Image (tube, rainbow, N blue to C red):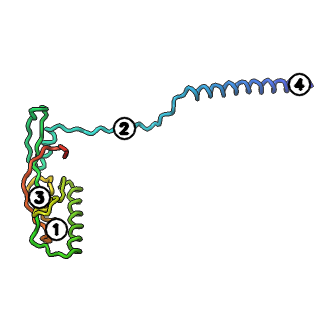
Amino acid sequence: MIRKLLVIIVIGITIMACKDETKASMNDIKDDIENTKPAVDSIIEVIETPITKSTKQIKEELTSKGFKTFDYIDDKTQDTILMQQYFIAFLKRGPIRGQNEEEAAELQKEHLAYLAKMYDLGYADISGPFGDDGDIRGITIYNVPTQKMADSLANADPMVKAGRLEIEIHPWWAAKGFPLR
């Protein structure tokens, strides 16, 4: 009987000790939770900064691809301005304009798709129609190294091939990287 009583007392003391230890552990956990900063994901966020090439590097790259360039120092800002030769294609009213409405609409659809393709491939930088009903219907600025290439691309336009438009191309210089305003 004493043995049973001793066993019960030892079990009771052990249970009480565990209970206090559990309370202490729970309090420690609560303190840890309250004092812990929000977890940071282990994935590191990379902020990409654009690689800026020098004017000299851009000029060398363009020259190696056959583009004509020159540069000068802007008197006001003292920046080096890089000029590149582009080619403006004037899209003029062509000799064959007798297409019916449906044919003209289909040609216009093909013309716009062609210009979008030239833009996507990096051959054309900007194009658009003029707002009047003159003989010059619009322009496309080709970003290619030679007039021969610009002429070839411009003459591959479905509207030009059909004779609805004809092309007149001129070399044109513009500062590299300057946006339209």
Label 4 vs 2, first from the N-terminus: 4
> Circles 2 and 3: CB distance less than 8 Å?
no
Q: CA distance from mark 4 to mark 2?
A: 67 Å
Q: Secondary structure at mark 1?
A: helix
Give the residue number, with chain letter if any, for mark 2: 46
Q: From the viewer's side, name the closer residue of 42 and 175.
A: 175
The dot on residue 159 is 1
Amino acid at circle 1: Met
**Label 3 to label 1, Cα distance in Å?**
13 Å
SS at mark 4? Answer: helix
Q: What's the amino acid at mark 2? A: Val
- Mark 4 vs mark 3, foreground winner is 3
Question: What is the C-alpha distance between the residues marked 2 and 3?
Answer: 42 Å
Residue at 10% across, 43% down: 83
Cβ atoms under marks 3 and 1 closer than 8 Å: no
The residue singled out by tag 4 in the image is: 5
Of the 4 image quadrants, the one containing the C terminus is: top left
Q: Are marks 4 and 1 in contact (CB under 8 Å)?
A: no
**What amino acid type should be assigned to the residue bearing mark 4?**
Leu
Mark seen at residue 89: 3
